[in-house]
Amino acid sequence: MREIPKCSCGAHSWKHGSASFSILLQEKYYTCDVCHKVGLQISHTGYYVFLIYNQASAELVTEYINGYLLDTSREYKIEVEGVRERRENSDIADLLTSMGIDSSKGWKYEAATDEMGEFIMVPSKIWDGGERVYEYQDDDGNRLDTDQVVLREEMKKIFDKHNDFPGNIIAPWMPVYFPFFMDGYLLVNSEWREIPKKLKS
């Protein structure tokens, strides 16, 4: 990732401040050594934004982030995951067809059961009761008639292939609404691009 943008005053002298991290949301705070504006780097579901504002506007900035900005990043994530899933499913359908399996019946990775409906178990060094055997099945629960070891290896290649950075799947969306009381940048193709200011329509 590129270094963070310059401050609105033109200086590039940021002092590190606090930070907060969760599974989906990361926030890093900075203070400009020259004009003392706040710099806030936000990462949410693969959507990276850098905001610059006066401390007096902090409450309005928080309201904007928790409302419009996070909603935008969630919608972006949904779109990215939809594209990722369609590409994966296309590759999986091609793989199953190449292995002589009717891909129209679907696929899932489930715990195998015997004729009595009991889970099939194998010995385990971790669990005293053994571990369940998992296998690829069609949507009706029928085991796919192929070498399951080979299928797992090929499936992993497909999932690894599509486990890409969100911005490489779909370019992040510029916020349609961006208030005038702060400056902002969106990370697109490893470059920080200024977010145009625009009032709500």
Image (cartoon, rainbow, N blue to C red):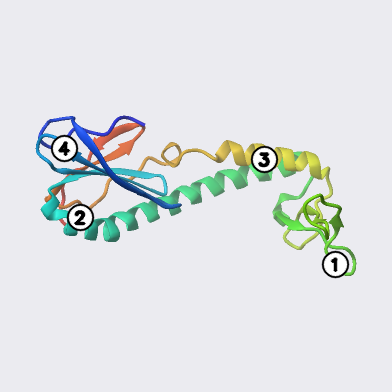
Identify the residue position indicated by label 2 in the image. 61
- Are dots 2 and 1 in contact, CB under 8 Å? no
Q: Is residue 155 left or right of residue 47?
A: right
Question: Which is more N-terminal, label 4 or label 1?
Answer: 4
Q: For the residues marked 1 and 4, what is the alpha-carbon distance in whole angstroms?
A: 63 Å
Q: State which mark lies toward you, 1 or 3.
A: 1
Q: Residues within 10 Å of mark 3 (few under 14, many from 20)?
A: few
The residue lying at 12 percent from left, 51 percent from top is 181
Question: Which is more N-terminal, label 3 or label 2?
Answer: 2
Residue 183 placement (x, y as % from top left): 17, 44
The residue lying at 77 percent from left, 61 percent from top is 141
Task: Report if residue 122 is visible in the image.
Answer: yes
Q: Nearer the viewer, residue 58 or 45?
A: 58
Q: Is residue 189 left or right of residue 101?
A: left
Q: Residues within 10 Å of mark 1 (few under 14, many from 20)?
A: few
Identify the residue position indicated by label 1 in the image. 118
Residue 138's quadrant in the figure? bottom right
- Looking at the picture, which amino acid does disc 2 mark? Val
Identify the residue position indicated by label 4 in the image. 32
Q: For the residues marked 2 and 3, what is the alpha-carbon distance in whole angstroms?
A: 42 Å
Q: State which mark lies toward you, 2 or 3.
A: 2
Q: For the residues marked 4 and 3, what is the alpha-carbon distance in whole angstroms?
A: 46 Å
| Helix, strand or loop under label 1 | loop
Q: For the residues marked 2 and 1, what is the alpha-carbon distance in whole angstroms?
A: 55 Å
Identify the residue position indicated by label 3 in the image. 156
